[in-house]
Image (cartoon, rainbow, N blue to C red):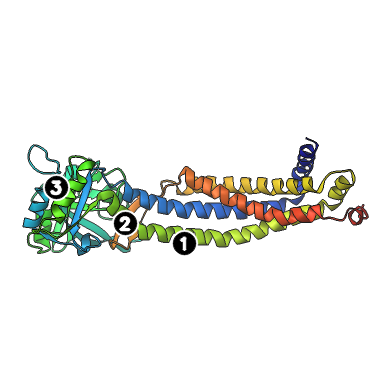
Amino acid sequence: MNWILQVISITKFGLLSLPQRLGATFATLIGIAGVVGVLVGVLSMATGFQHAMNVSAAPDGVIVLRSGATGEMDSGFGREETKVIADAPGVARNAHEALASSELFVIIDEPKRTTGTDANVPLRGVEPAALQVHDQFKIVRGRMFDWGKNEVIVGNGAAMEFAGLDVGSKLKVGRYDWLVAGVFTANGGVSESEIWTDARVLQAAYKRGDSFQSVNVRLNSPKSFNEFKDSLTSNPQVSVKVERQADFYAEQSKMMTSLISTLGVLIASLMAVGAVFGALNTMYSAVAARTREIATLRALGFGSGAVVVSVMIESLLLALVGGAVGAGLACVLFNNFHTSTMNFQSFSQVAFAFQVTTALLVQGVIWAMLIGLIGGLFPAIRAARLPIAAALREL
């Protein structure tokens, strides 16, 4: 109990002396806040991108590609093959048809609203079943396009990020103008980065014959996956790769998520080195300014262990404040910030919103505390080793 009281007393005196070294203290707080803000901000970009990919998958959703394909761009099917896929066991049905949408995927150039530079935007040709196959599809402005006409609907993310995609405007695709009939949402998923139209109309516009690149399927239940997959992979009429949508989108987001996360940690690590030196400078200055005070306390019987712990507590409290400030700023500045970036695995833009999660905020504060721990350790040891007699001569 006596040792704890010593720690409390020394820590109290240290905190009360903070106004005497505001400059160094403020610089340390800004440095730590910067590290946390950058770390949380960059990682929230990776989290938002991954979220947009993950929520695109329905639990009972499946995507079928040609065997060996790494994505939709290098896959391909004819009409007869898509019929075999739609007729496979395990596929859900409504009153009229199997819930299997054979789809065509092309890339068009559209200017970004903010910079005016062209970017790759996915244009997807779909079949009527797509409205039930793709999870949580909903028209929020305008109307559904008319089947058989040069009309499109635009994902909400694409409408926000790219110019010329407002309801009622005309979109130039190939030699034709396409009316933007409406805007849709899909729970924030990757579909909101796309433009949709009738697959047959898109086939004619791009002279693709009766070909498709993927088939998105809704199963009777998630448990029907193995039955559906086994029936197709053992069928000599088709050569396919069958994946749950969740697995497909996770694979499609892996490269970009890893790249963003690695860059974020690298940048934050470099900044953290500077913040550590700032914390070291602050705490060494604190120890130097309190040399006589610490020596006097030691002479009165305060232990060296209590001095070490008190200096460490002071450093950790400064780091905690800096980390909280950085986390707060990251939350205000980055959470739900909308942007788009290139997904190198599909060579198209994905519109998404940054997501500052509780886990990221906790991770940022942990980084701050580590900076405070390292920054306070050596000054604390120096304070505990101050020669009492030499320090008292300065009185």
Q: Secondary structure at mark 3?
A: strand
Please report contact status of discs 2 and 1: CB closer than 8 Å, yes or no: no
At mark 1, the secondary structure is helix
Indicate whether 95 appears above or below 54. Answer: above
Residue 9 percent coordinates (x, y):
79, 39
Viewer-proximal residue, 285 or 148? 285
User: Which of the numbered marks, if any, corresponds to residue 263?
Assistant: 1
User: Is residue 81 toward the left or the right of residue 372 in the image?
Assistant: left
Q: Which numbered disc covers residue 100?
A: 3
Of marks 3 and 1, the one in the foreground: 3
The residue labelled by disc 2 is: 251
- Nearest to N terminus: mark 3 or mark 1: 3
**Residue at coordinates 23% horizontally, 50% vertically from top-left?**
154
Question: Disc 3 and disc 1: Cα gap in Å?
Answer: 39 Å
Quarter of the image where the N terminus is located: top right
> Spatial distance from mark 2 to mark 3, Cα to Cα?
22 Å
Could you say which is closer to the camera, residue 175 or residue 213? 213
Depth check: 248 or 263 in front? 248
Q: Are marks 2 and 3 in contact (CB under 8 Å)?
A: no
Q: Which x, y percent locates residue 254?
A: 36, 57
Q: Is residue 109 left or right of residue 296?
A: left
Q: Residue furthest top?
A: 1
Whether 277 is drawn above or below 61: the answer is below
Task: State the image quarter where residue 182 is shown.
Answer: top left
- Callout in the foreground (2, 1): 2
Please state the horizontal and vertical placement of residue 101, each as a whole percent of the image. Answer: 14, 49
Where does the image place residue 323, in percent across and percent down from the top left? 59, 48
Name the kind of residue labelled 2 in the image. Answer: Glu
- Callouts 3 and 1 close, C-beta under 8 Å: no
Residue type of the residue flagged with mark 3: Ala
**Amino acid carrying mark 1 in the image:** Leu
Q: Does dot 2 land on a helix, a strand or a loop?
A: helix
